[in-house]
Image: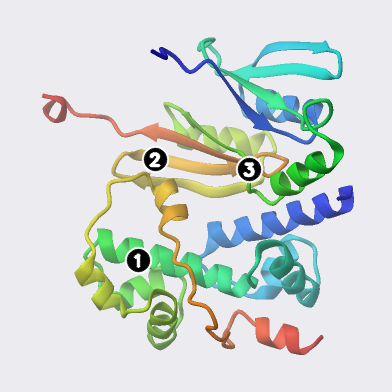
Amino acid sequence: MITKLNVTAIKVLDQDEALDFYVNKLGLEVGQDFEQGLIRWLTVRVPGDPGIEIYLEKPGPPAHDEATTAQLRELITKGAVGWVAFQTDDVRGLYETLKARGVTDFTQEPTDHFYGTDMGIRDPFGNAIRILQPAKVTQAATA
Amino acid sequence: MSREAEDLNRRLLRARDAMDRAYAQPLDVRAVAGVAHFSEAHFIRSFRTVFGETPHRYLQRRRVERSMFLLRETDRSVSDICFDVGFTSLGTFSRTFHEIVGETPSHYRAGHGPMVAPNCFQLVATRPVVAAGVAMRSSSFGEAAAEAAL
């Protein structure tokens, strides 16, 4: 039986730029960062939640041949590859924080739904990011 | 695949995102092309090559998808919804909706109730696909004029 999601990956075009965006702008923290052969194992995670790491994976050798790398890079920049969703306790506050940090690629400003309020942004490469503040569940609804 | 092509894709995606974000506002092709720093004609041509449809059709499908959502989820009148999603005339809305969905907004509403799925999923999964061979029509978006200028 699988018990836990451990590591997932987002494909990026440049790991330094990805680090700057996901850590300095979005507010995640670095999990692991070391080089092994041609690979830089660079992960980020939600602060205070070390159980799940996101590998910021740069397509290229030896995992991908040149043609595959080019195809992946093309698809990433078309917005056709990556997608990840986070939770927050204050989506509107985070929206203002991200704007103040220079994030401009919002795909959706904070919007209310029955399940909460969410917003959408794009990372520098084309990956989609959703951030949800779940609706408060009332006592009556859980009873 | 060059860095130039990647940069082109990313700029086109930024313009596409602007349509997704601001679909409810009046948009014309000049403003959207400006987001990606393109001339209008170059923008339309490049967008079609990269995303498989013109920017105007993309925007129409976004607006129609949002109208389908409001028809399913709210009690707002068809004409209110038409303006909510960025159409400026009820006639254009009804014609475009019928072209894309294959039935009128009222028929669609009668046949569909609320959906329990996150909105970001609905945005993608319920986006109507245009029937093959549907002709483009001119509109306030200004695409036809920009292409004619080629």
| Residue matched to label 2 | A117
Q: Check disc 1: other Cα within 10 Å, few if <14, some if 14-19, many if 20+.
A: many
Res A8 quadrant in image: top right
Q: Is residue B18 in sight in this rendering?
A: yes
Q: Secondary structure at mark 3?
A: loop
Asked where in the image residue A84 lies, by quadrant, the reply is top right
Depth order, front residue of B65/A24? B65
Distance Cα–Cα, label 2 vs label 1: 20 Å
Q: Is A78 in front, or is A111?
A: A78
Residue B127 vertical placement versus A78 (above, below) = below
| Chain to which the residue tagged by mark 1 belongs | B
The residue type indicated by label 3 comes to Val
The answer to whether B51 is drawn above or below residue B116 in the figure is below
**Callout 2 touching callout 3 (CB < 8 Å):** no
Q: Which residue is mark 1?
A: B68
Q: Nearer the viewer, residue B119 or B27?
A: B119
